[in-house]
Amino acid sequence: MATTENIHAWLWYSLWSVFLCLIATALTTWYGPGAFGSGVAEIIGHVNGVNYPDCINHKTLITKIIGVTLAVAGGLTVGKEGPLAHIGGNLGAMSVYIPGL
């Protein structure tokens, strides 16, 4: 039989997970829409010359890092290869513009 403490704990865990996932979704939708998707297809398309807007962008990088972190903390099943490939592609493309290298 479920006690009141168990129900409160389950409710707290569920609401916290929904809150974290909602922040990740809102961040991706309104701040960095280039972070939609896993990232592998976007990077492969970008390398092959497909014009994919906002694939390589500082907003996409920030959104991908924070969004994936919040999605994993919220309990969503997010792969590790796709987001890291997209983050690495963004960092690699942005490192070209660092002055003094």
Image: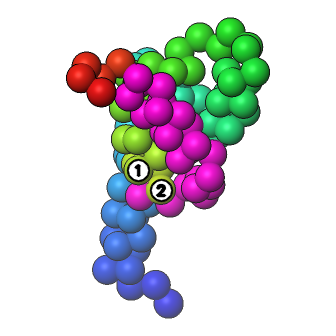
Percent from the top left, x then y, of residue 27?
Answer: 40, 29
Identify the mark at residue 34; answer none if there is no mark. none
User: Image quadrant for the C terminus?
Assistant: top left
Give the residue type at disc 2: Val
Identify the mark at residue 72; answer none if there is no mark. 2
Among the 4 quarters of the image, the one containing residue 67: top left
Residue at image location 50% in from the left, 90% down from the top: 1
| Residue 56 included in the magenta stretch of the image | no
Q: Give the overall secondary structure of the magenta segment.
A: helix
Rendered view: 34 above or below 11: above
Residue at image location 62% in from the left, 52% down from the top: 81
**Pointer 1 local density, CA inside 10 Å: few below 14, some 14–19, many at least 20:** some
Q: Is residue 42 left or right of residue 30?
A: right
For label 1, the SS is helix
Compare residues 101 and 32 and report the one nearer the observer.
101
Among the 4 quarters of the image, the one containing residue 30: top left
The residue indicated by pointer 1 is 69
Percent from the top left, x then y, of residue 22?
Answer: 43, 39
Give the residue type at disc 1: Thr
Residue 55 visible to the viewer: yes
Among the 4 quarters of the image, the one containing residue 66: top left
Residue at image location 47% in from the left, 56% down from the top: 72
What range is drawn magenta here? 73-96
Q: Are marks 2 and 1 in contact (CB under 8 Å)?
A: yes
| Residue 89 included in the magenta stretch of the image | yes
Rendered view: 96 above or below 13: above
Q: Is residue 26 left or right of residue 12?
A: right
What is the C-alpha distance between the residues marked 2 and 1? 5 Å
Percent from the top left, x then y, of residue 26?
Answer: 43, 28
Rendered view: 15 above or below 90: below
